[in-house]
Amino acid sequence: MKTCIREVRHARGMTLQDVAERCTPPTTAQTIGRLETGSRTVSIDWLNRIAAALDVDAADLVQAPEQLVLDIIALLGPEGVARPQQQQIAALPRPGHEGLTMLVEFSIGEYRRGDMIWLEKLDRKAFGRALNRDVLVPRAGGRFAFGRLIDRDANRLQLLPPGQGSRQQVIVDPPWIAVTIQLLRPLG
């Protein structure tokens, strides 16, 4: 992932040491320098820590290409791995205009620590499209509920949170929900 940490740091008038000290927990100027130059891989956790230290959004530190396209070189099927009959490509998924992202910090149910879940925001008229799918629902006080939408009755939604033994939650009259559309899982 290409970042612009150095450019943002310079624009904020901060030294490597300033950023290192403002990270939570604090780190060294040398580590920040390695992350800036790309000699050390910038994980999502580091990106969030540095963004907080610089007082910017993490997205402000990432230089993303318009759309990354990769050639598909093999297909995995019931007979094993085979070469595609015709050229195929895969485009790196990107959330749309109403796309939201949720990071999994603790493994629960089928979700693992480090998973990134992309969601599509739906208005009330489209809630029916999310039945039997995992959704994020806003709640009062800036909180959220997340789980499988198992029933919808007028303005009441019934969610079953991930994880064994979870108890059903009822959410009344949310302004919107966001349905899961893509799971990005780091391997290794």
Image (cartoon, rainbow, N blue to C red):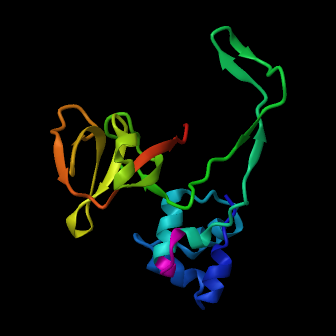
Q: Give the residue at x 65% y 59%.
A: 40
Name the one closer to the observer, 157 or 3.
Answer: 157
Q: Residue furthest bottom?
A: 13
Residue 55 painted magenta: yes
Q: Residue furthest right?
A: 86
Q: Position of residue 14 (x, y in %)?
A: 58, 88
Q: In the picture provided, is 34 more to the left or to the right than 107?
A: right
Q: Give the residue at x 66% y 77%.
A: 6
Q: Quadrant of the C terminus?
A: top right
Residue 37 position (above or below residue 123): below
Q: Quadrant of residue 70?
A: top right
Q: Quadrant of residue 75?
A: top right
Name the one closer to the observer, 32 or 83.
Answer: 83
Name the one closer to the observer, 13 or 61.
Answer: 61
Task: Tell me where the magenta segment starts and ends, as one range.
Answer: 53-58
| Residue 61 seen in this snapshot | yes
Q: Position of residue 43 (x, y in %)?
A: 55, 56
